[in-house]
Structure formats: structure tokens, C-alpha cells
Image (spheres, rainbow, N blue to C red):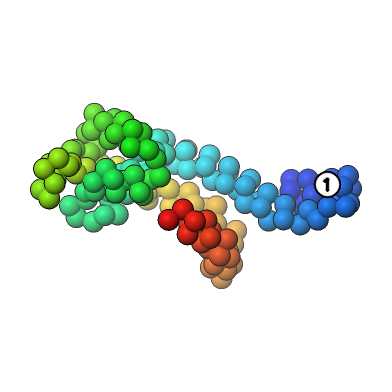
Amino acid sequence: MEDEVDRLVAAWRRERPDLDVEPLEVLSRVSRLARHLDRARRIAFAEHGLEPWEFDVLTALRRAGDPYQLSPGQLLTQTLVTSGTMTNRIDRLTTKGLVVRLPDPDDRRGVLVRLTDAGRDKADQALAGLLAHEREILAQLAPAQRTELATLLRQLVIPFDRAGQ
């Protein structure tokens, strides 16, 4: 079976035989897969009335465990956006009734962002929907293949994660 990357690599090998284009065989597929996954995730989130950024914030709070709250700074760390962007996102989620701002009992000037019951339900439903979509995507691979792929991708991602710390 041939895919678009096979055709791309063959063309480069024909046009530039002096270059080793082997990295394209892996990384171009990862890049293409990322675009397909982004599209699939947007569809999965839209089924639950969410934008991807809303899912990111809601699920960061949901993963925090009961009482499902984090400081804006903790949300920044988990979602990798600027403080201005996070403030805007919290405002928009507050307007939708998915989160509330509460005074931080440990910092008189600070606030905590907490999921509302509606926010928790929305996060749970959207996550279940996303996982169903992603299971379909991975269904072509045997369990052992999924495990091996996860291990290999982890090896590629860890240096980037460490550099960002």
C-alpha cells in the first residue's frame, strides 16, 4: 500500500538523489497525521459544543481532581498559552457557566478557577467522545503495535518536553 508520503519521497529521491530523504518517511507522516488528528479532534469537540482550547482548559481542571480547581498560573503551565490569553479564556468559560473564579484562600490577591458541575459534565462527555473517535483511528493497529508506537513516539517527544521545562 502506498501513501502520499511514499510518492513525495520517491519524487525527492528522483529529483535530489544526492540527499538522504529518509527522515521524511517518518516525520512527514507524523506531520500529516497531526493535521488529520487536529481535524478529527475539532469535529469530536464540536459534537459537544466545544472549541479545542475550551477542551484543554476544562480537562486540565478535571484532571486536577476534586474540587477541580487550579490557579490561572497552573492553567498556563498546562495549556502553554500567555497570561492574557488565559484571562480571556477564563472569562469566556465563565460566561458560558463552565467555570467560576474563586478567591485563593492562600493568596489574598490570587484567584482559583473551578469547574462548575456543567463544566465537569461537558469535559467528561467531550473526553468520552474524543476517546471513541481516537479508538476508531487506532483500530487498524493491534494492541502490541499501539504500545510499540506509543513507546517510539515517547522517545521522540521527551527531548522536546525537557527543553520546554
Looking at the image, residue 51 sits to the left or right of residue 93; the answer is right
Mark 1, other Cα within 10 Å: few <14 / some 14–19 / many ≥20: some
How many numbered tags mark residues here? Answer: 1
Asked which quadrant contains residue 118, the reply is top left
Q: Is residue 44 visible?
A: yes
Residue 117 image position (x, y, % from top left): 19, 43
Residue occupying image coordinates x 66% and y 52%: 27
Residue 21 in the image: above or below residue 43: below
Horizontal and vertical percent position of residue 136: 52, 53
Residue 14 coordinates in the image, percent (x, y):
89, 48
Query: For the point 58% across and 42% down, which residue is it?
Result: 35
Compare residues 110 and 78 and report the one nearer the observer. Answer: 110
At 26% from the left and 31% from the top, the residue drawn is 91
Where residue 139 sits: x, y (%)? 55, 58
Which residue is the extreme one toward the bottom?
A: 144
- Point out the image quarter for the N terminus: bottom right
Work out whether 100 lies above or below 159: above
Decide if residue 146 is in sight here: no
Q: Nearer the viewer, residue 41 or 107?
A: 107
Q: Helix, strand or loop at disc 1? A: helix
- Image side of residue 23 versus residue 130, left or right: right
Q: Quadrant of the C terminus?
A: bottom left
Q: Amino acid under label 1?
A: Trp
In the image, taking residue 81 as reference, residue 73 lies left or right, namely: left
User: Would you name the residue on which mark 1 appears?
Assistant: 12
The residue positioned 40% from the left and 35% from the top of the image is 51
